[in-house]
Image (tube, rainbow, N blue to C red):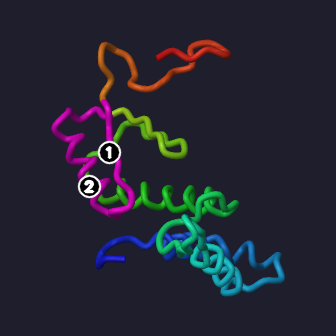
Amino acid sequence: YKSGEVCPERTFCIVLGVSLPGVCSIMTYEAGDIFCLLELCLKSTSFQFNGKFYRQTAGAPMGSPISPVIAEIYMEHYEDTVMRAIPLRPREFFRYVDDTFLIWPHGQDTIELFFTKLNSLNDSIQWTWERETNNELPFPVIRKIGTVDR
């Protein structure tokens, strides 16, 4: 990782380390053992493509059962870091996997600064945004059970 860039694996271990002592008190494993197993899961991923073997060098492996958990914990930490680092915050901020809904009460020029800060912490995580037009959201909205409007 570049100087100043956040390492997701390290951040996960830091975040997990805060809550891990309570968990470890009821388990037979030490925190260090869990960190070693986590590192093994995240750093020993390889795949074959067109007869050639590759090793994944960044991010959580796709398809691994641990990846959604790691991603969620990391993104919560990432969002908390951003929210503490900026003077203007959204009135509401909701994220589900890789979609985010927010209400920005501070004007169009300041929302661009918000996303610039959001995108400055990690080159691997880049956010884009779309504004509502004609009082309609730019993504599918469930109107009734079983129907989706565009």
Left-right relation of 89 to 47: left
| Residue 21 percent across, percent down from the top left | 68, 78
**What's the residue type where badge 1 is placed?**
Arg
Residue shown at 82%/75% (left/top)?
26
Mark 2 secondary-structure assignment = helix
Tell me, yes or no, whether the highlighted magenta stretch contains residue 121.
Answer: yes
Left-right relation of 94 to 145: left
Quadrant the N terminus occupies = bottom left
Residue shown at 35%/57% (left/top)?
82
Left-right relation of 12 to 132: right
Residue range (magenta): 104-130
The image shows residue 87, relative to residue 140, as above or below, that is below
Mark 1 secondary-structure assignment = loop
Q: CA distance from mark 2 to mark 1?
A: 11 Å
Residue shown at 67%/74% (left/top)?
20
Q: Quadrant of residue 91?
A: top left
- Mark 2 packing: few (<14 Cα in 10 Å), some, or many (20+)? some
Residue 117 disc label: 2
| Residue 128 percent across, percent down from the top left | 32, 43
- The residue beneath circle 1 is 89
Q: Quadrant of residue 105?
A: top left
| Residue 23 percent across, percent down from the top left | 74, 72
